[in-house]
Amino acid sequence: MRSDALRCIGCRREFPEDEILYACPSCGNLLEFIVPISDLDADKLRASFDSRPLGVWRYKELLPGFKGKSPISIDEGGTPLHRCVKLGNELGLRSLYIKFDGMNPTGSFKDRGMTVGITKARDLKVKAVVCASTGNTSASLAAYAGIAGIKCIVMIPSGAIALGKLSQAMMHGATVFEVKGNFDDALELVMSSSRELGLYVLNSVNPFRPEGQKTAAYEIVDQLGEAPDSLIIPVGNGGNNAAYWKGFSEFKELGLAKKAPRIYGIQAEGAAPVAEAFRRGADKIRPVKKPETIATAIRIGNPANWLKTIRAIRGSGGDCISVTDDEIVASQKAIAKNEGLFVEPAAAASFAGLIRLVESGDVGKDERIVCVATGHGLKDPDGAIRVSSKPIKIDASIKSLRAKMG
Ligand SMILES: *Cc1c(COP(=O)(O)O)cnc(C)c1O
Ligand SMILES: [Zn+2]
């Protein structure tokens, strides 16, 4: 019998897996799911994993259990680990990869967590699910709630969400509320709606979502044959980088990887409370009241997972830094032009951060480096058009074409 449980990241109090909790009633910290690593046989796991295709549920023995039927899944994960030859050469790097998690079913890594979260919601027999979202969480939750046949409510900050993401939530049938305020305000409303109205929250405070997200780390080890030296990843609410760290740490503990990478979190300058805490060498963040950045997916001033994030990055020996919106846009263009991958601005932050880390010498040129591209560029067509050169108008004649081609 497996002894799965939820554990408080603060006072370490344990709770049964099926208790609906987002924070510890004793100390208020977030919870995390504990995999009973010492009960597991690594050789057997390796054989089971190898018998299944790459993807989230390839690793089901390391995920929370589900009752009865199969998990609610549309083949999330199994995304490409793209070798960046041109960008690598340009920066003088020997071995650079992009893990393109924008290739998930709804176009962002959020699907990895949502397949686990919604399967749990089904088992708990919840009546309705809810999330606050800068866009990708709502797109993903709407899709998965649809498959599960569970009512879905999403709360988006007014005016600050990319068009592609909004259209997804609407098309998948969610009830969309536009909240007057920013993401942090919307999340507060979600948390009170769960207390007052009994809605099940699928933001990253939900302890099951990170479990799905950690599988991206397993996949990278399986795709490379070993963990990389450095992993560069955007940080918004801070759930994803902590999930990667959990994934790499579990594989290492099981002996399925020899090491875990240093994790470098990248924030946008106008929304960088975690990077600021690292600059000060502090153990706590100071929330940013009015976060601003073109990278809407990481436009978050008061990250819910700040403690998990700080521990993950420190524990890995990495760092958290910030980059400007100009650097983010330049990186988005460089990745599209040189590697053929269209990533959204938040996803491009990881490469922008890598450029700085190579300049500062924190990341060595001989290292094996993985940048995480968290979402697809088609999510934000307006943003892409704004920063690109406009189409040139011509008559339908060769003469006109020749004249304008230069
Ligand atoms: C959600 C999201 C992030 C931020 O992830 P956190 O877990 O909140 O740090 C980054 N990029 C994209 C594209 C996202 O959708
Ligand atoms: Zn506690």
Image: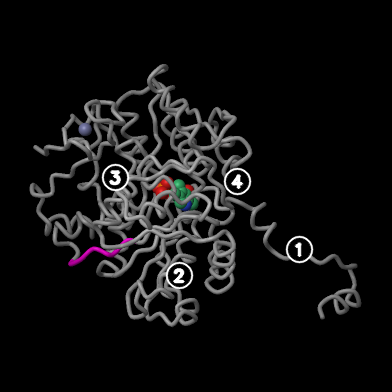
Q: CA distance from mark 2 to mark 1?
A: 30 Å
Q: Check disc 3 and give the amino acid type.
A: Glu
Few, some or many residues within 10 Å of mark 4 (<14, 14–19, 20+): many
The residue singled out by tag 3 in the image is 211
Residue range in magenta is 258-263
Magenta stretch encompasses residue 259: yes
Residue 111 in view in this figure: no
Q: Is residue 149 above or below residue 363?
A: above
Residue in the picture at 20% in, 58% down: 251
Q: Check disc 4 and give the amino acid type.
A: Ala
The nearer-to-camera label among 2 and 3 is: 2
Few, some or many residues within 10 Å of mark 2 (<14, 14–19, 20+): some
Q: Is residue 376 above or below residue 162?
A: below
Where is residue 328, by image quadrant?
bottom right
Q: In this rendered view, identify the residue nearer to me: 122 or 129.
A: 129
Q: Position of residue 149 (x, y in %)?
A: 44, 28
Q: CA distance from mark 4 to mark 1?
A: 20 Å
Label of residue 390 in the image: 1
Label of residue 162 in the image: 4
